[in-house]
Image (cartoon, rainbow, N blue to C red):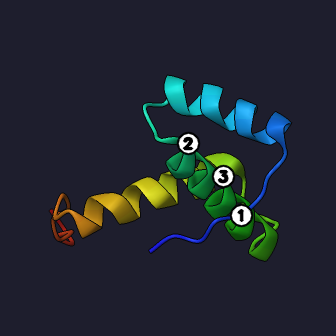
Amino acid sequence: MGTAIKISDKLAESARLTAQVENRSLSGQLEYWATIGKIATENPDLSFDLIHEILVALAEAENGRVKEYQFGS
């Protein structure tokens, strides 16, 4: 169950436009931005690109799209 929050019209419009381009819902876009922001705040030495790649890798692992690395192969 979600929680209703108030955000500025400017942020909502920016998120709406970006969500349309990236095929996300408005709430999905805001959650994505919040996730990136939280990770960046907690890990200031990580670049956006590295954070994004980590999130992609986690999603792949959660969906069974990884295979075990074989050492010496």
Mark toward the start of the polypeptide (2 vs 3): 2
Amino acid carrying mark 2 in the image: Leu
Residue nearest the viewer, comparing 47 with 14: 14
Q: Position of residue 58 (x, y in %)?
A: 38, 65
Q: Is residue 29 left or right of residue 25?
A: right
Q: Position of residue 16 (x, y in %)?
A: 62, 32
For residue 35, which quarter of the picture? bottom right
Residue nearest the viewer, comparing 68 with 22: 22
Which residue sits at x=75%, y=72%?
Answer: 43
Disc 2 and disc 3: Cα gap in Å? Answer: 11 Å
Reading the image, the residue beneath label 2 is 26
Instruction: Find out whether the residues at labels 2 and 3 contact each other: C-beta distance under 8 Å.
Output: no
Disc 2 and disc 1: Cα gap in Å? Answer: 13 Å
Q: Secondary structure at mark 2?
A: helix
Q: Position of residue 30 (x, y in %)?
A: 63, 51
Q: Considering the image in quadrants, where does the N terminus appear?
A: bottom left
Amino acid carrying mark 1 in the image: Ile
Reading the image, the residue beneath label 1 is 5
Instruction: Find out whether the residues at labels 3 and 1 contact each other: C-beta distance under 8 Å.
Output: no
Q: Secondary structure at mark 1?
A: loop
